[in-house]
Each structure stands twice: as C-alpha cells, then as structure tokens.
Image (cartoon, rainbow, N blue to C red):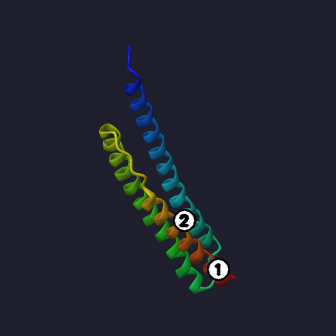
Amino acid sequence: MRDDNEAKYVQQHLANERTFLAWIRTAIAIMGVGFVTTSLHFELRGVASSKADVLIKAVGYASLVLGCLTFVSATLAYLRKRAGINRGEFRASSWIVMFLAVALILIAVIFGLYLYNAY
C-alpha cells in the first residue's frame, strides 16, 4: 500500500505532464496559424501588395520561431518542475507566459498591419 506522500507526488508529476502537453499543443497551434495565414495569402497573391507579402512572411516566420521557442521553453519548464517536485519545491514559471503573451501580441500587430496593407 502506498503512503499519502507518494500518491501526492504522482499527482504532481501527472499534472506536470498534462501542462507540458498543453504547451506542446499551444506550440503546434501557433505554428499552424502561421502556416495557414501564409498559405492563404499566397493563394490570393495577385490581389495583395508587395508590402503585404513582406508582412505575411514575417507572420509566418515569427509563428514558426515562436512555436519552436515554445517547444524548447515547455521542455525546460517541464524538466525543472519535475526536478522541483522530486525535491519538494515549486516555482511558478511566469516568464514563459509573459514571453508568449508579448510575442503573440507582436505577431497579432504584424498581422493587423498585413490586413491593413493587403487589399
């Protein structure tokens, strides 16, 4: 029979894994949005301006880079939390949330500029 502390750590590790998987889904979604917007733009290429081409490429590349950085950050946060759980410590990772929020706002602004200049 397990004692309560061991069961408590199991729940924490499982919660850490669920959080990691949520970050992975977020990274995939970020890259997917960049891919979809870029491909949609280039399907309508004859209508848009050359400035819009540059802006949508920036959205696509920024989404790809941000998705990859989210993968790396999520993995590092998962490993740090895993070690912290085993040591009985916890530190919230607010930096990844703040970084992602700022980066997504920047991508949204670039996309807004694209929409303004596209047609």
Q: Residue at x 54, y 67 (%)?
A: 104
- Label at residue 88: none
Q: Residue at x 48, y 40 (%)?
A: 18
Residue 100 on image: x %, y %: 49, 63
**Hey, which quadrant is residue 17 in on the image?**
top left
Screen quadrant of the N terminus:
top left
Q: Residues within 10 Å of mark 1 (few under 14, many from 20)?
A: few
Q: Residue at x 63, y 77 (%)?
A: 112
Q: Residues within 10 Å of mark 2 (few under 14, many from 20)?
A: many
Residue 57 on image: x %, y %: 51, 75
- Label at residue 34: 2
**Hey, which quadrant is residue 111 in on the image?**
bottom right
Relative vertical location of residue 79 with respect to residue 60 in this rendering, above or below: above
Relative vertical location of residue 106 with respect to residue 89 in this rendering, above or below: below
Label 1 secondary element: loop
Q: CA distance from mark 2 to mark 1?
A: 20 Å
Residue 83 on image: x %, y %: 30, 43
Task: Choose between 89 and 58: the one closer to the eye.
Answer: 89
Task: Choose between 9 and 54: the one closer to the eye.
Answer: 9
- Say whether residue 47 is visible: no
Q: Amino acid at mark 1?
A: Gly
Residue picked out by circle 1: 46
Task: Choose between 112 and 78: the one closer to the eye.
Answer: 78
Would you say 59 lies left or right of 20 here?
right
Screen quadrant of the C terminus:
bottom right
Q: Amino acid at mark 2?
A: Gly
Tag nearer the camera, 2 or 1:
2
Q: Residue at x 57, y 61 (%)?
A: 33
- Say whether residue 48 is visible: yes
Label 2 secondary element: helix
Would you say 65 lies left or right of 45 here?
left
Q: Earlier in the sequence, mark 2 or mark 1?
A: 2
